[in-house]
Image (cartoon, grey):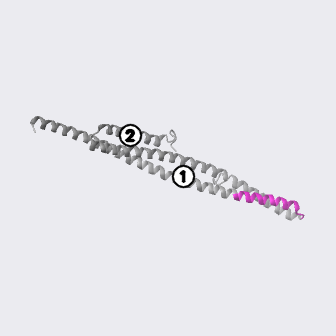
């Protein structure tokens, strides 16, 4: 090998080494972004599941209160029939008092602002939990797409080192930007794009 060829070979090796360092840095940055999006995605997934359970529990409580209210209201209506048939004045007073108690109970089951456990309040809480669940689910989908972009970027950047094909590194860089965009959308505006 001549001195000129040896110099060219050394320059080429130095250039390849510099490129590989840049690609390795790109891979490290992509791995960092991947870790962040995965962490955010798992947090959003956990919140989505938690809010789904909360909404289900609130709707079950709502149904139980509705059933109780219906039973009590039915008893009050039945008491009115008994009241009409009662001939004894003392019996009429007792039945009327029971009807009033049942009606108060039915009203309390419908609206109980002091405890927040009336059907009106439970429905509002359940709808709020559903909204939070939907928000967390939308975030999760964005973070999952971001993670996929980062993973594919890592693979393409790694392939650049093996093949020497620089367009793969550019595509990895573009995927990194796309992943960052999806991460930001997931964090701050998850309903801007409807992904599911």
Callouts 1 and 2 close, C-beta under 8 Å = no
- Quarter of the N terminus within the rendering: top left
Image quarter of residue 169: top left
Q: Report the magenta residues as a range.
A: 67-87
Q: Closer to us: mark 1 or mark 2?
A: 2
Percent x, y for residue 39? 41, 50
Q: Which mark is drawn over residue 175?
A: 2
Q: Residues within 10 Å of mark 1 (few under 14, many from 20)?
A: many
Magenta-drawn stretch contains 38: no
Image quarter of residue 87: bottom right
Q: CA distance from mark 1 to mark 2?
A: 32 Å
Q: Residue furthest top?
A: 4
Q: Earlier in the sequence, mark 1 or mark 2?
A: 1
The residue positioned 16% from the left and 38% from the top of the image is: 9
Secondary structure found at label 1: helix
Does residue 55 appear left or right of residue 1 in this picture? Answer: right
Would you name the residue on which mark 1 appears? 51
Secondary structure found at label 2: helix
Foreground of the two, 68 or 15: 15
């Amino acid at each position: 090998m001549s001195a000129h060829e040896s110099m060219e070979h050394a320059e080429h090796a130095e250039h390849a080494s510099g490129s590989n360092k840049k690609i390795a840095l790109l891979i490290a940055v992509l791995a960092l972004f991947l870790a962040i999006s995965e962490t955010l995605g798992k947090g959003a997934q956990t919140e989505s599941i938690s809010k789904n359970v909360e909404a289900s529990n609130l709707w079950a409580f709502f149904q139980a209160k509705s059933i109780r209210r219906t039973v009590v209201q039915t008893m009050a209506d039945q008491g009115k029939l008994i009241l009409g048939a009662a001939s004894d004045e003392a019996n009429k007073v007792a039945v009327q008092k029971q009807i009033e108690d049942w009606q108060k109970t039915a009203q309390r089951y419908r609206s109980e602002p002091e405890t927040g456990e009336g059907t009106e309040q439970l429905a509002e809480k359940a709808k709020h939990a559903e909204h939070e669940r939907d928000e967390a689910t939308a975030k999760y989908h964005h973070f999952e797409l971001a993670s996929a972009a980062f993973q594919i970027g890592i693979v393409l950047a790694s392939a650049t080192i093996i093949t020497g094909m620089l367009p793969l590194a550019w595509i990895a860089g573009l995927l990194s930007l796309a992943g960052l965009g999806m991460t930001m959308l997931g964090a701050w505006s998850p309903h801007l794009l409807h992904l599911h």
